[in-house]
Image: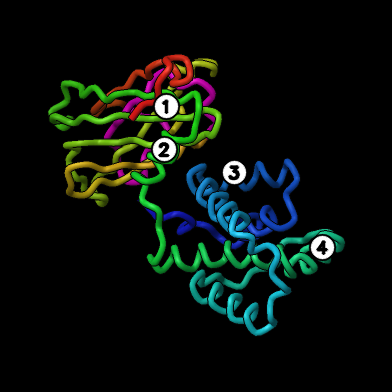
Amino acid sequence: MSAHFAGWDRRTLDLALDEVTLGLSEEERAELRSRAGAHELEALEHAVAELNLAGLGELEAAPAELMRRISADASAHFDFETAAPVARPVGARARRFSLWSAAGWVAAAVVLACFVLDRSGAWTRAPADLRERLLASAAGLVRAPWTPTADPLAGALSGDVVWSSERQEGYMRFRSLAPNDPERNQYQLWVFDSTRSDWEAQPVDGGVFDVGPGEEVVVPVDAKLEVRKAALFALTLEAPGGVVVSSRQHLLATASPDPPAEQSGSRPR
């Protein structure tokens, strides 16, 4: 499992910077969502929100030397290959440069700092903390306790899944899930969205992940498509990198969601 932002390329970074400074069109925002996981965008939004609450948007324009250092540090940490720039309207470029003053440069600097610090391991919010924040703040959550199958590899695993369709964010929690060898196999989540046609035969890929030793592990759900109504979650063991269609040879556990928290009158914990 990678840290927030660790897999973002230059195009994704450009889109993120524009989102917090200029704002994106619907088409660009859809592209950003297709490139970044929901939990990554949530972490980005949280960082910018904390910045705004601190009142840092009222600072003076950034010193030229500071911006030079930020740019140099970002390039060093990202290690981007030289590539042709993506064409943008002249007006958008001009607005972007003007927004590097005052609130604009502060927000952009925070985004760059998030990337740089996250790449170096200095700041990474633990999935367990993000799960707790989701439980405390999101309405309409569904919770699904894991039920192991008869597969010998399932062992005595337990835990649950929490999912918010509104935020397109969720987390898997496991106890007693055996560590895997990434060179031989990886775990993969499948989400059965009952609003989709042929949903029982074609679940949504919820992402592949690795598990190391430990009593409990929390893993973000990385749904590749929008999940509007999660009717079932399933955990399989697949070849490295995962598969498009699972043979379900090693179906380790399933989880059937409880009613949404706002309907049941309490939040899952």
Residue 126 x %, y %:
36, 51
Q: Which residue is mark 1?
A: 191
- Residue drawn at point x = 82 percent, y = 59 percent: 92
Span of residues in magenta: 225-246
Q: CA distance from mark 1 to mark 3?
A: 18 Å
Q: In this view of the protein, which residue sits in the foreground, 152 or 148?
A: 148
The residue identified by callout 3 is 33
**Residue type highlighted by circle 1:** Val
Query: What residue is disc 4 on?
Result: 95
Q: CA distance from mark 1 to mark 2?
A: 9 Å
Query: In the image, which disc is placed on residue 221?
Result: 2
- 94 sits to left or right of 11: right
Question: Nearer the N terminus, badge 1 or badge 4?
Answer: 4
For mark 4, give the secondary structure: helix
Q: Position of residue 216 (x, y in %)?
A: 22, 41
Give the label, 4 or 3, closer to the camera.
4
| Residue type at numbered disc 3 | Arg
Which of the two labelled residues, at mark 2 and mark 3, occupies the earlier sequence position?
3
Is residue 244 rendered magenta in the image?
A: yes
